[in-house]
């Protein structure tokens, strides 16, 4: 079988380098193009020296992509930039997996409200499929444009989906307390990721207004067919990779631990990247892998269902999930190229 030809637009950031790290060993694709507007002409390994002798491919500009025969393109670009490339390519030449937030929400008005940006390509919202494979694999398989989920939403929606799908919880009280690694802020230096601000520190940010709040809400609303009230608070951890989310919800009726755990076993029985845990997981349990580890418990004292999930924000929260979506789009085995064992320590 001939290899599928893929391109990566946006090579300079963490997500671009993670896509290359995963795809370079994928047995059914070849990386035909990697772009960087500011570094075109250089070798990819000049930007990311850990690829030296492994991927020394010359970087090109995104304009050169238009003339190439590609099967799929990953857009590893900032919010507000990806939409311009989708508008330019018009989904006619190749399929697209967009790792930005430009097409994750339901409509343009909601996007502009939460992202404080003008959207330039409303027509593509009708084409876009939300790329959470555990929930939307069938739609993803037929999609021309997949909107790869945000990292925080992935860590929140996966543990909540079995409960909202079964209508087991009070939708007016969903509390999500998430902690993310510094790499979630991107590769560009700034105040948020200065060593002196991050090291030996821990802080909350984006209270009440973080853009991932609406992404989580819209998917849970869609999946539960009811309105959910989401209290989402992100925090910044002094680590390089990982997200840990602790979630508190209340059951609508009396519930016991054993049947609660069975709900999860049934829901995720054929999902290779969701692992159900007997003890609360740690971020190093999934580091550099595409797994999402989930722990579920019930506290009779407070009448709370307790959920703890962990993902690697750069893999299951970004590049790994994008490759998982690509595998589904090409009818490959879902786990192809994604069997990396977590790195610990």
Image (cartoon, rainbow, N blue to C red):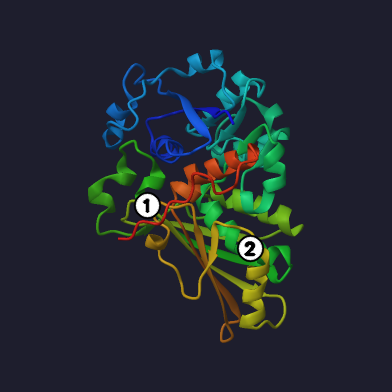
Residue beneath the point at 62% across and 63% down:
160
- Is residue 138 placed above or below 268 in the rendered structure? above
According to the picture, the residue beneath numbered tag 2 turns out to be: 268
Q: Furthest residue to the front?
A: 1
Q: Report the label total.
A: 2
Q: Say which quadrant the N terminus sits in.
A: top right
Quarter of the rendering occupied by the C terminus = bottom left
Label 1 and label 2: CA atoms lie apart by 25 Å
Residue on which disc 1 sits: 241
Q: Relative to 236, is 4 above or below?
A: above
Q: Position of residue 304 (x, y in %)?
A: 59, 77
Residue 106 shows up from this direction: no
List x then y, in percent, for residue 48: 30, 33
* Residue drawn at the location 37% of the way across and 30% of the way down: 12
Work out whether residue 140 or residue 250 is closer to the camera in this orientation and state it.
140
Q: Kindly report which numbered mark, 1 or 2, lies closer to the viewer in this rendering.
A: 2
Asked which secondary structure carries label 2, the reply is: loop
């Amino acid at each position: 079988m001939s290899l599928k030809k893929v391109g990566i637009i946006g090579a300079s950031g963490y997500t671009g380098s993670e896509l290359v790290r995963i795809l370079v060993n994928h047995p059914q694709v070849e990386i035909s193009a990697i772009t960087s507007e500011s570094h075109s002409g250089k070798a990819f390994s000049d930007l990311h020296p850990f690829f030296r002798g492994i991927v020394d491919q010359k970087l090109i500009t995104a304009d050169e992509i238009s003339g190439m025969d590609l099967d799929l393109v990953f857009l590893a670009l900032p919010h507000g930039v990806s939409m311009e490339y989708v508008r330019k390519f018009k989904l006619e030449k190749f399929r697209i997996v967009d790792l930005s937030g430009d097409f994750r929400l339901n409509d343009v008005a909601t996007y502009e409200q939460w992202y404080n940006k003008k959207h330039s390509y409303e027509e593509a919202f009708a084409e876009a499929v939300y790329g959470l494979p555990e929930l939307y694999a069938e739609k993803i398989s037929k999609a021309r444009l997949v909107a790869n989920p945000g990292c925080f939403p992935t860590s929140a929606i996966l543990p909540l989906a079995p409960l909202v799908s079964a209508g087991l919880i009070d939708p007016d009280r969903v509390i999500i307390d998430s902690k993310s690694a510094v790499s979630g802020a991107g590769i560009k230096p700034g105040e948020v990721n200065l060593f002196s601000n991050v090291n030996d520190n821990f802080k909350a940010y984006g209270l009440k207004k973080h853009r991932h709040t609406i992404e989580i809400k819209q998917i849970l609303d869609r999946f539960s067919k009811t309105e959910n009230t989401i209290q989402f608070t992100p925090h910044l951890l002094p680590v390089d990779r990982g997200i840990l989310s602790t979630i508190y919800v209340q059951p609508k009726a009396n519930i016991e631990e054993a049947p609660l755990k069975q709900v999860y076993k049934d829901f995720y029985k054929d999902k290779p990247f969701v692992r159900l845990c007997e003890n609360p997981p740690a971020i190093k349990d999934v580091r550099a892998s595409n797994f999402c580890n989930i722990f579920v418990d019930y506290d009779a004292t407070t009448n709370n269902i307790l959920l703890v999930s962990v993902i690697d924000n750069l893999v299951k929260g970004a590049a790994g999930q994008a490759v998982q979506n690509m595998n589904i789009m090409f009818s490959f085995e879902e786990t192809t190229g994604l069997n990396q064992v977590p790195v610990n320590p």
